[in-house]
Image: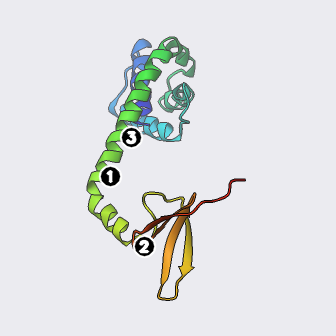
């Protein structure tokens, strides 16, 4: 929820400037840490940042009642927060995928799970020559030798 953390820090500094309250470096660090922790605990629902804003304001001694100044424009700011949250999550997923691509490919090669359909029912078929694992899904059977067969199933 990086958009929420940015929003809470900027809004707290805005409220401090609006009240002619000078913030020192320690209070700005406190706002940053409190906004980060509060945004981690915030629910992923609209206007959740307003509730956690009270925590940030009280951490540095600002009046919590000034949250009402933000309410008038929060509907617009919420759209930008959501955009930043989604963009940050997308970048995070892309970076993790890029850094662990080889490991994921190696896991796919050694896995017994059917990657094309992980919800397929795994069944072990006893054959006279060898024992084969197959995945049965809606009448289609794919064994480990990649042979595909179709059997008609009755519908309930």
Residue 78, given in percent of the width and then of the height, sits at: 47, 22
The type of colouring in the image is rainbow
Q: Secondary structure at mark 1?
A: helix
> Do the numbered discs 1 and 3 sit on residues whose CB atoms are within 8 Å?
no
Q: Quadrant of residue 46?
A: top right
Residue 156, given in percent of the width and then of the height, sits at: 72, 53
Classify 10 Å Cα crowding around label 2: few (below 14), some (14-19), many (20 and above).
few
Q: Which mark is residue 144?
A: 2
Gap between marks 1 and 3 measured at Cα: 11 Å
Q: Does residue 60 appear anywhere in the picture? A: yes
Q: Work out whether 84 lies above or below 74.
A: below
Q: Work out whether 84 lies above or below 145.
A: above
Gap between marks 1 and 2 measured at Cα: 30 Å
Q: Which residue appears at 53% of the width and 41% of the height?
A: 41
Judging by the rendered image, the residue that carries numbered circle 1 is 96
Q: Depth check: 23 or 118 in front?
A: 118
Classify 10 Å Cα crowding around label 3: few (below 14), some (14-19), many (20 and above).
some
Name the N-terminal-most of marks 1 and 3.
Answer: 3
Camera-nearest label, 1 or 2: 2
Name the N-terminal-most of marks 1 and 2.
Answer: 1
Name the N-terminal-most of marks 2 and 3.
Answer: 3
Q: Which mark is residue 142?
A: none
Q: Depth check: 139 or 108 in front?
A: 139
Residue 53, given in percent of the width and then of the height, sits at: 51, 27
Residue situated furthest bottom in the rendering: 129
Q: Which residue appears at 50% of the width and 23% of the height?
A: 62
Q: Does residue 7 appear anywhere in the picture? A: no
Q: Secondary structure at mark 3?
A: helix
Gap between marks 2 and 3 measured at Cα: 36 Å
Residue situated furthest right in the rendering: 156
Judging by the rendered image, the residue that carries numbered circle 3 is 89
């Amino acid at each position: 929820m990086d958009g929420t953390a940015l929003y809470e820090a900027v809004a707290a500094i805005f409220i401090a400037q609006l009240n002619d309250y000078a913030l020192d470096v320690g209070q700005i660090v406190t706002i940053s840490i409190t906004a980060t922790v509060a945004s981690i605990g915030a629910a992923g629902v609209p206007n959740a940042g307003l509730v956690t804003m009270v925590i940030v304001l009280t951490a540095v001694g600002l009046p919590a009642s000034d949250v009402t100044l933000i309410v008038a424009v929060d509907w617009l700011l919420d759209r930008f927060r959501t955009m930043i949250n989604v963009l940050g999550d997308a970048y995070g997923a892309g970076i993790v995928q890029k850094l662990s691509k080889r490991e994921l490919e190696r896991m796919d090669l050694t896995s017994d799970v059917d990657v094309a359909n992980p919800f397929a029912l795994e069944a072990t078929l006893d054959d006279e020559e060898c024992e084969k694992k197959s995945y049965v899904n809606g009448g289609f059977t794919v064994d480990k030798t990649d042979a595909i067969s179709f059997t008609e199933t009755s519908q309930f």
